[in-house]
Image: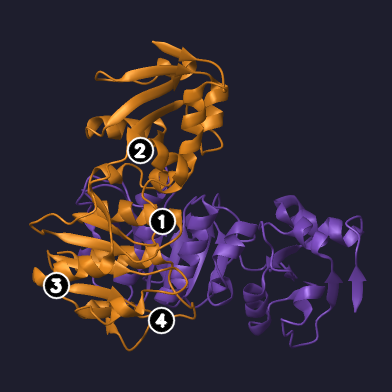
Chain colours: A orange, B purple
């Protein structure tokens, strides 16, 4: 097994750069941290290039399959990790660049993210979409990247359970509408339709907007209906991930 | 207007300590950061002791009412703030120590937090409870303090809209049950009752448990029913704040 002990090693320098978008695009790879995610990636046949593990973790993880495994020091683990207390096991995974188009046969419920910014919100929404039984999540142009380390972490493995795409939402909407899908926008507007008026269904698309500005105006005009969650108290709004959770569990049959 | 320019000033030292539980208990006060929260506190007649403001913010905030206002430097603002980029306006507010018992006449829906730990989750749940029209939130013994700076911030003013109590949940449950309230526990157990089987109501209590361990066993045995949100995909669980949001908007009439 290869062993790397120096932070000056060229591979280590490359791994450390995976925290940035530039580093990920230069190498076409991203980093998974922690056994839970690495294990999920293995189980779901993700395109893993290498697994990195510290000596102390080597005995606690069970790496089934034929992977290039590299032994690293605690110092290197701390250097490449995005977390404060890394777990000592990582995978370098190829970014699947082909997931930028909808499947030719549309099925199930889809969540569309319109310029949602906060990594924690995005990760939580993907995890919730998985739990609710959604087919996929589309990261619209302007939403944070699904390979951002914080998003990767907060998706908690759900990124390997459902389809994640990156594409322009106007195009995605057109495809859904042409396929006969209802496309629901969301807005913080009591004049919009209360979400409880929508009959739960199997096939539909739901769009959630930016934390501060909501959904793009041009998308709002093209939807089948725009939904509103009635606010009864004095709170000004709901967190976008909470709103998405309420809607996904209500709308999906 | 009093002006403080030195970080060595005894008041500044006291304010900086409000980040810690010990500092808050020694002075009986806590810190609000940012105009949104300070403004909400003013509007809701919270027991504000002083308002601190930097020179650059003095013109942008409109402090209505007769408050002791102290001019501080940017350096002091950075020193006392819990945020990386403080907004330059703060309030020192008395902790209301009396909110440790239920009102004698129980009304409306209540959310009970059983050893929930993450400040962001707690803050979001209080904000969501406000939006859903809940009457109050009870922080059970072992849950993080409602005066923790991160919780204060993520409640986004909802702490001034609904009742927040701190008390033992076993006692609270007894009171609710004696008053004829249904008390719903939550568990990640498909044998529990699906939440959609519960008819929305006006008066009830809902208990959410710890992120990792769920609700205390001894509380689970005393509830009217324990609810489960059916997980359809492969996600292992829902974030506790998301689960709370789904339940609160479903259960409250």
What separation in Å lies between label 2 and label 3 (alpha carbons)? Answer: 33 Å
Quick one: SS at disc 3?
helix
Q: To which chain does the residue with label 4 belong?
A: A
Q: Earlier in the sequence, mark 2 or mark 3?
A: 2
Asked if one can make out residue B49 in the rendered structure from this viewpoint, the answer is no
Report if the CB atoms under discs 2 and 3 are less than 8 Å apart. no
Report if the CB atoms under discs 3 and 4 are less than 8 Å apart. no
Q: Residue furthest top?
A: A1
Point out residue B61 in the picture as x, y percentages from the top left corner. 72, 81
Point out residue A209 in the picture as x, y percentages from the top left corner. 37, 70
Point out residue A215 in the picture as x, y percentages from the top left corner. 36, 74
* Residue situated in front as seen by the camera: B201 or A161: A161
Q: The C terminus of chain B is located in which quarter?
A: bottom left
Residue to which mark 4 is pinned: A232
**Quarter residue A219 falls in:** bottom left
Question: On the rendered structure, is B118 left or right of B86?
Answer: left
């Amino acid at each position: 097994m290869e062993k790397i002990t120096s932070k000056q090693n060229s591979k280590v320098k490359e791994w450390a750069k995976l925290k940035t978008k530039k580093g990920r695009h230069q190498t076409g790879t991203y980093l998974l941290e922690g056994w839970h995610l690495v294990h999920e990636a293995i189980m779901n046949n993700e395109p893993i290039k290498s697994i990195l593990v510290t000596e102390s973790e080597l005995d606690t993880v069970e790496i089934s399959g034929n992977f290039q495994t590299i032994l690293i020091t605690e110092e290197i683990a701390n250097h490449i990790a995005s977390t404060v207390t890394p777990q000592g096991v990582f995978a370098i995974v190829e970014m699947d660049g082909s997931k930028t188009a909808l499947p030719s046969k549309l099925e199930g419920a889809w969540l569309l993210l319109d310029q949602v910014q906060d990594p924690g919100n995005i990760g939580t929404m993907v995890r919730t979409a998985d739990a609710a039984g959604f087919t996929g999540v589309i990261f619209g142009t302007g939403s944070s990247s699904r390979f951002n380390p914080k998003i990767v972490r907060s998706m908690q493995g759900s990124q390997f359970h459902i389809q994640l795409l990156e594409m322009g939402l106007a195009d995605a909407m057109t495809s859904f509408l042409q396929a006969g899908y209802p496309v629901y926008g969301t807005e913080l507007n009591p004049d919009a339709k209360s979400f409880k008026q929508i009959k739960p269904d199997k096939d539909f698309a739901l769009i959630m907007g930016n934390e501060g500005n909501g959904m793009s105006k041009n998308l709002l005009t093209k939807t089948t209906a725009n939904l509103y969650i009635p606010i009864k108290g004095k709170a000004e709004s709901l967190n976008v991930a909470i709103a998405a959770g309420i809607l996904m569990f209500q709308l999906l049959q």
